[in-house]
Amino acid sequence: MRASLVWMMAIASGASVANLYYNQPLLAKIAQQFGVSAAEVGAIPMLTQVGYAIGVLLIVPLGDRLERRRLIVTMTICSAISSLLAAVATNLVWMSVASFAIGISAVSAQILVPFAAQLCEPAQRGKVVGMVMSGLFIGILVARTVSGFVGARLGWQAMYWLGSGVMVLLAIVLSKQLPRYQSSLKMAYPALLRSMFERLKREPTLQASSWIGAMSFGAFSVFWSTLVFFLAQPPYQYGSDIAGLFGLIGVVGALAAPIVGKIADRRSPGFTVKLGILMTTTSFLVFWIFGKQLLGLILGVILLDLGVQTTQISNQATIYRLPAEFHSRLNALYIMLYFVGGALGSYLATSAWNRAQWTGVCAIGLTMMLSAWFGLFWRQQRLKNVA
């Protein structure tokens, strides 16, 4: 697998998943234009993540059955159309429906990840998955920076027009550069979906990894869904452009993904997942104690993004040690549950913000990370029992 193809898949993953996160720095502006509260506008990121979870569950498993390049290009075109619908939204209901469609159509990133894992040599799998996931995670972080900058200067609708154009260009590039890959699997679609849940019942590793991933990403969403409201208040009083710049700080975590992948290859994903959970938990303690100091907030963002990325790479490296013919379905199930956790985090965050402001946000984040620690402990106990 040539390096240029890995890089292209990393960039494509990042650009696709970025569509899910354009809304976060823009929530205050959208709420102001539509005349709604922070709690009401919180439905936008929640529905985007719910849509993504559903899209991952229903569409990504088709990567084990259909020609993958065609499936990826088709979903990229659908993503362009969904962003266009958001750009012309005139009320919260319309915007919520468009956001749900954006979530469903942004799943090409999760078809690309197992595609890359299958194209490479087993000894390089952690490194290659780390590189593609690094691109995906950078897309998540840079999306907020670009969105905040564009929204502050051109209005929130301009970001969705731009996002739609990027998806059109990406569809053209992918159709020319991705290799064709037709799976030999001939399983009917209902049986394909049923096989995922049958696998989940039999695999304690998949169960625990999905729980840990969901709780970690839920905590991640808790922070990013409320940051724009926190920064709008004293002592910061920043706008959407500055809130978006915090995404660049988290690139440190994204750039570490290939290193995490190598460590997972050499030692074990179990070792690196502990580090990831520890860093994410520590980040919320830093937010709680030092969040009103700029350096404390920056340190917390670095720890949060590095911790969540480390946990994600470790979990996926663990899952891709299971039989290769299940990779798309296993990834679909894992990411679906991952984004259910993210949607739960977004919902709980806006509710906590309305009731207890930043203290409530940090408490919800720590609670979710405590649940991740329980998931890790449960996995270790199950593996001991199996042994």
Image: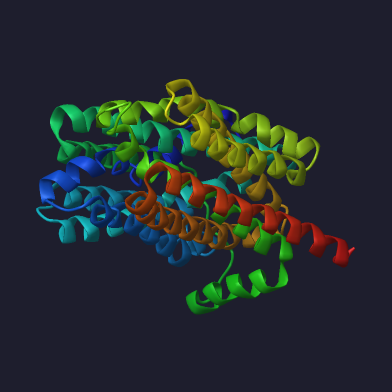
Image height of 325 relative to 237, above or below: below
Residue at screen point 67% across, 54% down: 319
Left or right of 290: which side holds 256? right
Where's residue 60, x and y in %? 48, 60
Identify which residue, 98 or 167, lies in the foreground.
98
Specify the quadrant of the image occupied by residue 98: bottom left
Residue at screen point 63% across, 31% down: 258
Tell me, yes or no, if residue 213 can be seen here: yes
Identify which residue, 152 or 185, lies in the foreground.
152
Where's residue 386, x and y in %? 86, 66
Left or right of 201: which side holds 14? left
Specify the quadrant of the image occupied by residue 162: top left
Specify the quadrant of the image occupied by residue 379: bottom right
Residue pushed farthest right? 387
Tell me, yes or no, if residue 187 can be seen here: no
Coloring scheme used: rainbow
Where's residue 208, x and y in %? 67, 60
Image height of 361 relative to 15, above or below: below
Image height of 263 relative to 371, above or below: above
Q: In the rendered view of the protein, which quadrant contains the C terminus?
A: bottom right
Residue at screen point 59% across, 50% down: 369
